[in-house]
Image (spheres, grey):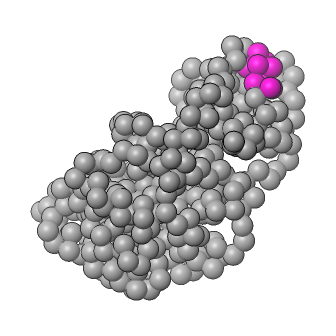
Amino acid sequence: MHDAGAVARLRLIRTPGVGPVTYRQLIARFGDAGAAIEALPMLARRGGGAAPRVADAAIVLRELDRVAALGARHLFLDDADYPPLLAELDTAPPAIIVRGDPALGRRSVVAMVGARNASAAACRFARGLASELGRAGIVVASGLARGIDTQAHVASLASGTIGVIASGIDIAFPPENRELQEEVATRGLLIAEQPPGEEPRARNFPSRNRIIAGLALGTVVVEAAPKSGSLITARLATEAGREVMAVPGSPLDPRAQGCNLLIREGATLVQSAEDIEEAIRPIDARALRSPVRPFAGPPADDASDADRRRVTDLLGPVPVGIDELIRQSGRPPAVVQTVLLELELAGRLDRHAGGRVSGC
């Protein structure tokens, strides 16, 4: 038998249109997932659309059974074992699926990412950095991809490593890292946001990258092209207020251009593990001092029809910051957030990075 609260939370999480921000707001407003599910039709109706179809309880129960059979478990946002730094993100996954030791997520974590087709020199440097960080008691997080990710995990297996994947926790990608992924799951911590059986899709990788950045006090990029997933991770780390670090490379090597660009834009230049330790030290104690209260905050206010018209009129296809909507609408923040919640559940709002929204 599964806990009824866990079943309700997972049904809400797996409901189309309920993203991380919406989930937080629903729980903060209604207190629990069951009450939030009951309120969905009313909220969507106010937003001018049909209510989203709530995930079927039987499907959710099968997912819970499958996760347990794999030797894994769900961690919900308000669970004590949920990684505290990840929980600080507005877009933190409401639930993650984990295998291994969740305590690693509560230690000092540094993310290390880089090119899949990394040079031999960069691979060697990444292994050295990860080993030195491990000796300093720092956990290394990465994405179990080819190249730099692989080197970072291999070098930190003994000291503490966290692997975040873009598929279900039972899917290994790339296939040649199957044994490494199993080692990470048994000797470290393996994290997936997607349910079991989910193949790695292109749209899942940015979501995985936000988890990697969110787990860590800082992200170090060892080698990366200007348009790469590693730079997306670095941008997400910046948006989360975390340290961004980069290893410089030859201007003649395209694989170094992304790192050199990050340094030019203000990232900390890294030549040794000591540089990383120094960069994260000022926020380390502060960041780990107190537990996160993910559902704290003032209760949402109901919005009038005039409030809805005013906020809706300000929305268009171009993403705009929520703060700007509050300023231009002249409505209280809680009222604006309520209108946006209703519109999203009605399928009339898209959320974007950096706390921006657009009409659809």
Camera sees residue 302:
yes
Q: Is residue 310 visible?
A: no
x, y percent for residue 325: 70, 34
Residue under the point 72% across and 30% down: 341
Q: In the rendered view, tell whether residue 90 sits above or below residue 12.
A: below
The answer to whether residue 41 is magenta is yes
What residue is shown at x 15% (from left), y 64% (from top)? 119
Which residue is depicted at the point 69% across and 57% down? 79
Q: Is 182 placed left or right of 67 in the picture? A: left
Q: Is 153 rendered above or below residue 94?
A: below
Query: In which quadrant of the rendered view does residue 347 lie?
Result: top right
Q: Position of residue 131 (x, y in %)?
A: 33, 80
In front: 88, or 271? 88
Residue in the foreground of this view, choosing between 351 and 41: 41
Considering the whole magenta stretch, tell me its main secondary structure. helix
Q: Position of residue 285 (x, y in %)?
A: 63, 79
Side of 198 where 337 appears, left or right: right
Quadrant in the picture for the C terminus: top right
The residue that appears at 56% across and 65% down in the rendered structure is 102
Q: Is residue 110 left or right of residue 41?
A: left
Q: Which residues lie in the magenta part?
A: 38-46
